[in-house]
């Protein structure tokens, strides 16, 4: 079942094409890694997919309805967006911030905080013990989990996350990617912007590689990340390693 | 205790304080009045001196203290939530400056001799013009555009106000203007209440309608939009907040003059008691602002220090030390 589909989506800012004819198809239970060098247009493409910007041309369908025809409230019940970490959150308790994820359902305050979806989101992200702590006291890893918990509390079929593991140490990055994988296993469709190609290869069903605003390749990770692409897009060379977890390592 | 219950308790305490001070403000003043007799006269429709003092002087003054203080507190809380900056103040919109310019122009042209309503109507016209210019300048721009537009409008209105002060021919008129600019509720009547009321009601409704969006905005504009809130455009959250605060503050400044620090200090002090949740801060800030202004107005009336102290001077004298204390506490926390 297709949850989210973008077809030939383009967006210009002034003279510059930030996204050019980009396409992506997200099915239920799948994790798509959106990868590419800095400035490739990944974040803008994510904002278009999230309905936060309107494309100049092209078409985005969310659960078979055009994004432009869906009200912001309905969109919020079908798609959760985790933007790049915007710095320290306010000193509200973690549970209250996670409960903001219930706002699209018209639930707020204590009514929202008591909702089973909030408890479940705190539980799966391992935040139950921290739920009374002020969010401003959380570490980077805990903050990333709180952002995911807020998205999970909305209980949407689609989750979009823009660089959710960018500032995390390997252990936290790994645990976040496991959480995304686990959610996909329960039927959600997930698109994640990633720079860590090792984790992208390991946890994503499909990679969509962007460069200069265009999707230049998509498919299973091992097919997308070949030596040629690594050299031309990422400007790094690849050394093949036999019997390793990943069959290659990066070298400059 | 659940956070909703805590907020309810806070509101109940503040409301009790407002009701208590409301009564006290009617009972006590410069002239001694037997309140029970005056009340009986009012109810019986007799125009005794006591009845006139309470019904035509103290009641409108007290109502204005509730409205002006409440609006300054509420607008401060809404703007601090929207801009995610605890130092935002209703004055940053430039609408107070517009109201001051409108009122000062009435002084300059001598229109205030025509009617008692000329001065507040002039202030209201200035505030509405400033609000219209602000809305036009901001358009679909975000918070940075709003801050810049407010700063530009505020500076321009201050420059024009200074120009009027500079050109005013009579030193007495300059004194009157300076006096008005310090803010006061002295000698206000029900005419002032009626002039202020529509802006206060519309402004309050617009600002309160943005409460949930303010909560969502604590995690940034992108999260708020992804949670289903439309921030920009006609009917968007920014329009509701800016128009609401501009209408409310402009209407109040038009009748009271500039009263500083209430909009800044009240939300600042109450925020920790509401769990730092912007929507929960709105009603307490309204009540806290009313409470503070009722108290300040009673102090102004009852403390005899020669000429009556201007309300804006007192609120600034009370508000500034709060910030000194905050600075000292912050330095201690950092070190």
Image: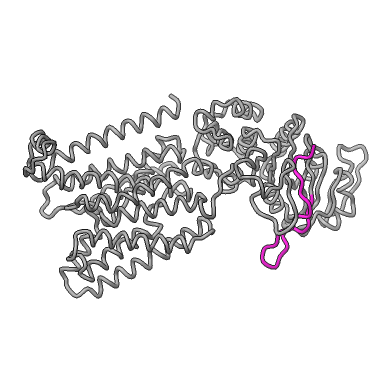
Secondary structure, magenta segment, majority class: strand
Instruction: Give the x, y percent position of residue B37.
Output: 8, 35
Q: Which residue is at a point 42% across and 65% down the rendered structure image?
A: B152
Q: Which residue is at a point 26% across and 58% down the rendered structure image?
A: B120
Question: Which residues fall within the magenta stretch?
Answer: A1-23
Instruction: Give the x, y percent position of residue B95.
Output: 37, 59
Instruction: Give the x, y percent position of residue B169.
Output: 19, 75
Q: Is residue A4 magenta?
A: yes
Above or below, B114 against A238 in this view is: below
Above or below, A150 against B99 in this view is: above
| Side of B333 where B161 appears, left or right | left
| Side of A215 where B156 appears, left or right | left
Q: Which residue is at a point 69% across and 54% down the rendered structure image?
A: A44
| Side of B261 where B221 appears, left or right | right
Q: How is the image coloured?
A: one colour
Q: Nearer the viewer, residue A100 or B116?
A: B116
Q: Quadrant of the C terminus of chain B?
A: top left
Q: Quadrant of residue A172?
A: top right
């Amino acid at each position: 079942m297709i949850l989210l589909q973008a077809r030939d989506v383009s967006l210009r800012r002034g003279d510059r094409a930030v996204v050019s004819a980009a396409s992506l198809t997200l099915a239920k239970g799948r994790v798509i890694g959106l990868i590419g060098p800095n400035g490739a247009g990944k974040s803008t493409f994510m904002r278009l997919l999230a309905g936060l910007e309107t494309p100049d041309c092209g078409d985005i369908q969310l659960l078979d309805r055009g994004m432009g025809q869906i009200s912001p409230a309905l969109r919020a019940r079908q798609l959760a967006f985790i933007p790049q970490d915007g710095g320290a959150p306010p000193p509200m308790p973690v549970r209250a911030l996670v409960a903001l994820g219930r706002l699209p359902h018209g639930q707020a305050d204590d009514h929202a905080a008591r909702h089973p979806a909030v408890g479940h989101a705190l539980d799966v992200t391992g935040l139950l013990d921290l739920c009374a702590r002020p969010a401003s006291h959380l570490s980077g890893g805990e903050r990333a989990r709180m952002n995911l918990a807020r998205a999970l509390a909305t209980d949407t079929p689609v989750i979009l996350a823009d660089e959710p593991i960018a500032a995390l140490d390997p252990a936290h990055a790994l645990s976040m990617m496991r959480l995304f994988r686990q959610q996909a296993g329960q039927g959600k469709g997930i698109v994640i912007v990633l720079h860590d190609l090792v984790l992208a290869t390991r946890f994503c069903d499909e990679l969509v590689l962007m460069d200069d605003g265009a999707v230049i390749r998509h498919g299973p990770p091992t097919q997308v990340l070949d030596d040629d692409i690594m050299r031309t897009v990422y400007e790094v060379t690849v050394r093949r390693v036999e019997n390793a977890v990943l069959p290659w390592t990066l070298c400059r | 205790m659940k956070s909703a219950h805590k907020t309810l308790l806070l509101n109940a305490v503040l409301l009790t304080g407002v009701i208590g001070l409301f009564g006290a403000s009617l009972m006590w003043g410069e002239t001694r009045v037997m309140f029970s007799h005056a009340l009986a006269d009012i109810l019986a429709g007799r125009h005794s001196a006591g009845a006139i003092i309470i019904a035509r002087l103290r009641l409108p003054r007290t109502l204005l203290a509730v409205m002006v203080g409440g609006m300054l507190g509420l607008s401060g809380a809404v703007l601090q939530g929207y801009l995610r900056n605890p130092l935002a103040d209703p004055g940053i919109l430039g609408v107070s400056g517009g109201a001051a310019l409108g009122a000062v122009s009435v002084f300059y042209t001598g229109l205030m001799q025509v009617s008692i309503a000329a001065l507040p109507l002039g202030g209201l016209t200035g505030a509405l013009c400033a609000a219209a210019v602000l809305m036009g300048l901001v358009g679909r721009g975000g918070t940075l555009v709003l801050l810049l537009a407010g700063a530009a409008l505020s500076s321009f209105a201050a420059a024009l106000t200074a120009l009027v002060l500079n050109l005013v021919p009579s030193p007495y008129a300059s004194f009157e203007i300076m006096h008005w600019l310090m803010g006061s509720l002295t000698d206000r009547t029900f005419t002032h209440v009626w002039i202020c009321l529509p802006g206060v009601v519309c402004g309050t409704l617009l600002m309160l309608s943005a409460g949930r969006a303010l909560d969502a905005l604590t995690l940034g504009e992108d999260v708020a939009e992804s949670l289903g809130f439309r921030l920009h455009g006609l009917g968007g959250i920014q329009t509701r907040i800016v128009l609401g605060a501009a209408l409310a503050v402009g209407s109040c400044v038009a009748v009271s003059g500039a009263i500083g620090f209430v909009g800044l200090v009240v939300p600042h002090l109450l925020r920790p008691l509401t769990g730092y949740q912007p929507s929960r801060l709105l009603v307490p800030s309204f009540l806290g602002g009313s409470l503070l202004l009722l108290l300040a107005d009673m102090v102004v009336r009852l403390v005899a220090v020669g000429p009556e102290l201007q309300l804006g001077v007192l609120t600034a004298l009370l508000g500034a030390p709060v910030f000194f204390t905050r600075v000292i506490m912050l330095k201690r926390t950092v070190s």
